[in-house]
Amino acid sequence: MKKYLGVLFLFFVPFIFVSCEADYEGVGDDTPDADPVVKSITLSISEASLAVGQEITFQVLSDQNNIITSSCKFFVNGTEISGNKFKPGEPGEYSVNATYKELTSNTESFLATATELKDFKFNVLIEDFTGAWCGYCTRVTYKLEQLKKTTSQLNVVAAHYGDALQYSKISEMTNAFGVSSYPHARLNRTTKWNETDAAVTSLFSTKAKAGVALESSISGSTLTVKFQAKFSETGTDMLYGLFLLEDDLLLDQRNYGDFGYGSADPLVDFKHEDVLRYSFTSPLGDNIPNDSSKAGSIFEKTLTYELPAAYDKENLKLVGFVTDGSKKSLNSRISDIGLTQTFEEL
């Protein structure tokens, strides 16, 4: 009997040993899976413009949205660099792309300037859609009038509809901005102003990436204006606009309450300010070529207008603005006639 038990023991022990060894190998295998196949890569840059000697950083993402920067090679103006950081040695436009194995990324461009580019003071643009027939419009007019007394960073354009001061292309503006009731004041061409000071003053600390400067003169009845826009970062699909405004225009104004001017209705010979008389451009803006809206670039355009005899030259002023492709005002500037402005760099 012991003989048979011995034989059985010798038979089962190797079997158990081999079976356990196989199970151990399967459970304990921590060999990683093969790298997922990367089919495309995307390059991004830390900034679109910088001063000579400053450092720019590049990053690469795979199509699985993994950062693979350390596994890539980078080429600036066609020459491979060491690592993913670069300091331009001279002013100019640079291009960069990356490679990962057999893949090549998109190409990005950046601008190096001799001096550091400066941002600009931001001026709020409010377009007040109004009319002498609108009895509640005096409420908005008064609030804007009081707010202008406290700051130089608010530019108001009064666009009249349905009265003797109506702007000739008012429908183009109201359609574009969805104006269907009055009063309606548009804040930086994006939203309807809620008539609070804070909605305006909270924007004064904005560092604008576009600056505006105007230069103007009158010879006889010809008004000549040089519009300039400067950019601290590259933009595309930019637009510029230039309005001619007139102050101190007298016209009876309906008035449905004491909003600041008393309760008389109408307000006889009410003095209308900031009245939009003419637009040198489309009221929605004209195109700025992309080559002229790169970081460090200055766009310039000279425009003329023959002033009607009815316009009082002493009461005229200009408002210029720059918008992006979504119609948002990036900055604006107001100027009396006969001035030469410089950019309001910070």
Image (cartoon, rainbow, N blue to C red):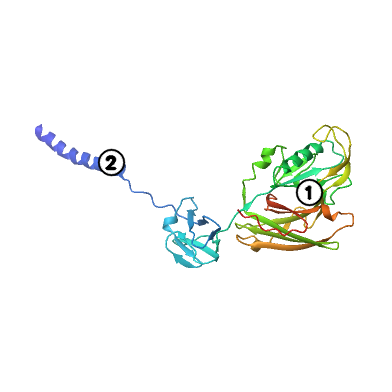
Which residue is the site of mark 2?
Answer: 23
Q: Residue at x 67, y 38 (%)?
A: 198
Disc 1 or disc 2, which is closer to the eye?
1
Q: Residue at x 86, y 54 (%)?
A: 312
Most extreme residue toward the left is 2
Point out the image quarter for the N terminus.
top left
Image coordinates of residue 122 in percent, x first then y, are: 65, 49
Name the quadrant containing residue 149: top right
Which residue is the site of mark 1?
Answer: 173
Disc 1 residue type (three-letter): Met
Instruction: Determine the secondary structure under disc 2.
Output: helix
Q: Could you classify mark 1 by the number of other residues whose Cα lies within 10 Å: few (under 14), some (14-19), or many (20 or more)?
A: some
Disc 2 residue type (three-letter): Asp
Instruction: Determine the secondary structure under disc 1.
Output: helix
* Numbered mark located on residue 61 in the image: none
Image coordinates of residue 88 in percent, x first then y, are: 50, 64
> What whole-number distance in Å separates the C-alpha atoms at marks 1 and 2?
77 Å
Decide which of tag 1 and tag 2 comes sooner along the chain: 2
Judging depth in this view, the residue of 64 and 150 nearest the camera is 150
Q: Residue at x 77, y 40 (%)?
A: 184
Please state the total of marks drawn on the protein image: 2
Name the quadrant containing residue 345: bottom right
Give the vertical position of 340 relative to 196 (above or below). below
Give the vertical position of 262 relative to 346 (above or below). above
